[in-house]
Image (tube, rainbow, N blue to C red):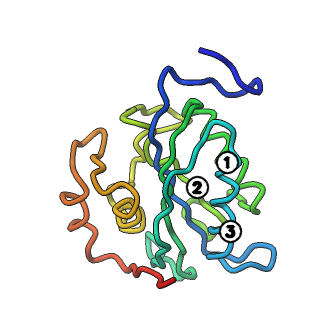
Amino acid sequence: MAFISGLTKTPDEPETVLIAIGANLPYAGQVARETCQRVVAALQDVPGLCIEAVSAWYESAPVPPSGQPPYINGVVRGVARIGPEALLHALQTIETRFGRERSIPNAARTLDLDLITYGSLCQNDSHLTLPHPRAHERAFVLLPIQDVAPEWVHPSSGKTLADMVPDVAEQEIRRIQE
């Protein structure tokens, strides 16, 4: 495997990735939706990542319920020619650039980027768990995935979106009209 820029390695084959985008706090004078839209452009600038599709934007209640403002959520589908750890590092760098502060779990935030899947890779270690361990429990992940990867199958459970979406039907979420 070759190294690019000293910190990323190229996988043997490019992999399809799903990345969830979410925000519920303003950043630098922008509302959360504007931040999410700007993040798509930032993702397009990640070396070794090619964005192929962007979902509609959704407004959802925080999970778990907390009295926070609603979130804006979406998902991008891309092709990665960098490894999953390098991609995670790039996502965390973008979060920091957009004012993300890590405090308590599930705190309100200016930006949240989650690597939902990296091809069919299944791994569970202290640094990165794939697929994302709670993606299948969240309407704000599954509904945007339907927009960009309607045939997606959960890599570890083998369930389709049609199997999983009914289980999150009670969660508060609405598609934002453009």
Query: What is the distance, in whole Å, between disc 2 and disc 3 at their CAs?
Result: 10 Å
Packing grade of label 3 (10 A; few <14, some 14-19, many >=20) is many
Q: Residue 155, relative to residue 168: is it above or below?
A: above
Report whether 148 appears left or right of 99.
Answer: left
Query: Tag 2 or tag 1, which sits nearer the N-term?
Result: 1
Query: Disc 2 residue type?
Result: Leu
Residue drawn at 50 percent across, 73 percent down: 57
Residue drawn at 42 percent across, 68 percent down: 140
Residue drawn at 60 percent across, 41 percent down: 49
On the image, the x and y values in percent for residue 163 come to: 18, 57
Query: Which element type, helix, strand or loop, lies under badge 1?
Result: helix
Q: Name the residue under label 1.
A: 92
Q: Mark 3 points at which residue?
A: 110
Query: Which element type, helix, strand or loop, lies under badge 2?
Result: strand
Q: Mark 2 points at which residue?
A: 113
Report whether 57 appears left or right of 164.
Answer: right
Query: Tag 1 or tag 3, which sits nearer the N-term?
Result: 1
In this orientation, which residue lies closer to the viewer: 45 or 117?
45
Query: Disc 3 residue type?
Result: Thr
Query: Disc 1 residue type?
Result: Gln
Dots 1 and 2: beta carbons under 8 Å? yes
Query: What is the distance, in whole Å, between disc 1 and disc 2 at their CAs?
Result: 7 Å
